[in-house]
Amino acid sequence: MPEEVVFESESERSRADVAELLRRVADSLDAGDDVTLSAGEESVTLAVPERVTFETKVEEETGAGPVETSVEFELEWTDGEGGDGELRVE
């Protein structure tokens, strides 16, 4: 099945800014609320079900320059399975 990117954002931020963004997502998840991501004029609201697959991945990219390290946190679920709410965009 092909993938479609419905929202994407990338920006350089301080560690404190990243922690605050992650904290806001965590607070929404903990409260059972929808998670809304926005950047500029774009936004997406996600109704995250009670149970999801959580993936953590650390990658190191090596080449001619310095090693670039990245960490990815991914929540994954299948629409209609395990969720109790509809996806809404506000």
Image (cartoon, rainbow, N blue to C red):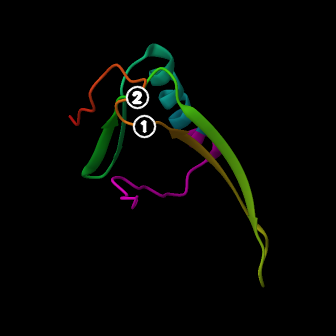
Q: Was residue 90 drawn as part of the magenta stretch in this picture?
A: no
Q: Residue 22's x, y, as percent?
A: 55, 35
Q: Circles 1 and 2: CB distance less than 8 Å?
A: yes
What is the residue that sits farthest to the top in this orientation? 31
Q: What residue is shown at x 50% (from left), y 39% (from top)?
A: 76
Q: Secondary structure at mark 1?
A: loop
Q: Residue 51's x, y, as percent?
A: 52, 24
- Comparing 9 with 75, the one in front is 75
Give the residue type that dot 2 points to.
Glu
Residue pointed to by mark 2: 81
What is the chief secondary structure element of the magenta stretch? loop
Give the residue type that dot 1 points to.
Thr
How many marks the image carries: the answer is 2
Q: Residue 87's x, y, as percent?
A: 27, 32
Residue pointed to by mark 1: 78
Does residue 78 appear left or right of residue 40 in this picture? right
Q: Which mark is residue 53?
A: none
Magenta region, residue range: 1-18
Q: Is residue 5 above or below residue 38?
A: below
Circle 2 crowding by C-alpha within 10 Å: few under 14, some 14–19, many from 20: few
Q: What residue is shown at x 79% (from left), y 70% (from top)?
A: 67
